[in-house]
Image (cartoon, rainbow, N blue to C red):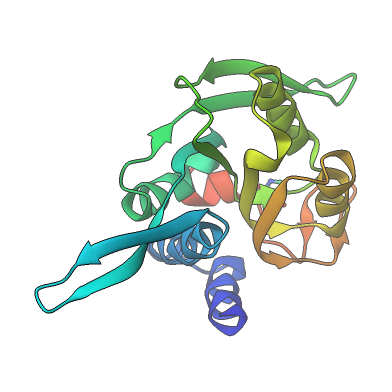
Amino acid sequence: MQQLKDQLLTILRHVGTDIDTFRRVTDKLSTILAQETSLLLKSDAHPIQTPVTEMVGTRCTENVVLIPILRSGLAMLPAFQTFFEKSKVGIVGYYRDKTTAKAINYYENLPPITNEDRLIIIDPMLATGGTACSVVELLLQHNVPEEKIIFTGVLASPEGKRHLEFTYPKVNIILGAVDKHLNHVKYIVPGIGDFGDRYFGTV
Ligand code: URA
């Protein structure tokens, strides 16, 4: 699967990729990431009757709550909603304070969360990890156990991945790839550039 993810990432990384291709490939890669994420969900044995005989199948025992981070997280949402057909969606927005460099929450609209829920934060670029950690912190404040949280992204910097892993070791992380490093303006290198600008056409 990594080979296919790398091929799709190569298209996203290419500076000449146009917006329609960028969106289509984002959707395809997000579907693969949704499938990888689904392997973390709990299931149980489920006895059924087929037209031919009885058998014990399996079924997922967790409900999915998708948490896209504005704005780029919205790019992964259609594929994730198609994959997790019954998922609820909670949207959060953060901006970076220019003086403290801290992620500040400016928008939060979460559905009611139950014990059977598994929360999947979706954001394409895990750069510094600051925003991802702030979203995890927000969910913990809503009494979500840390081990019920998954972060799924397209690309990470080693620094961002380490930051999230170190701060919240029980959060599972699913990624398309991990790149080399962050540059001085906190872009992932070699990276994709500004994901939101390329996806929404605001370059
Ligand atoms: N956000 C982006 O869109 N790109 C990066 O490289 C880092 C953060």
| Residue 8 x/y as whole percent | 52, 74
**Nearer to the camera, 75 or 197:** 75
Instruction: Residue 71: tell me if it is visible.
Output: no
Residue at the farthest front position:
54
Work out whether 92 lies above or below 59.
above
Residue 77 as seen in the image, left or right of residue 133: left
Work out whether 19 lies above or below 76.
below
Residue 185 as seen in the image, left or right of residue 12: right
Work out whether 185 lies above or below 30.
above
Give the residue at x 62% y 53%: 153
Give the residue at x 49% y 68%: 17
Give the residue at x 79% y 42%: 129
Residue 3 as seen in the image, left or right of residue 62: right
Which quadrant of the figure has residue 19? Answer: bottom left
Q: Quadrant of the N terminus?
A: bottom right
Residue at the farthest bottom position:
3
**Nearer to the camera, 24 or 116:** 116
| Residue 184 x/y as whole percent | 90, 48
Which quadrant of the figure has residue 2? Answer: bottom right
| Residue 24 x/y as whole percent | 38, 63
| Residue 36 x/y as whole percent | 54, 65
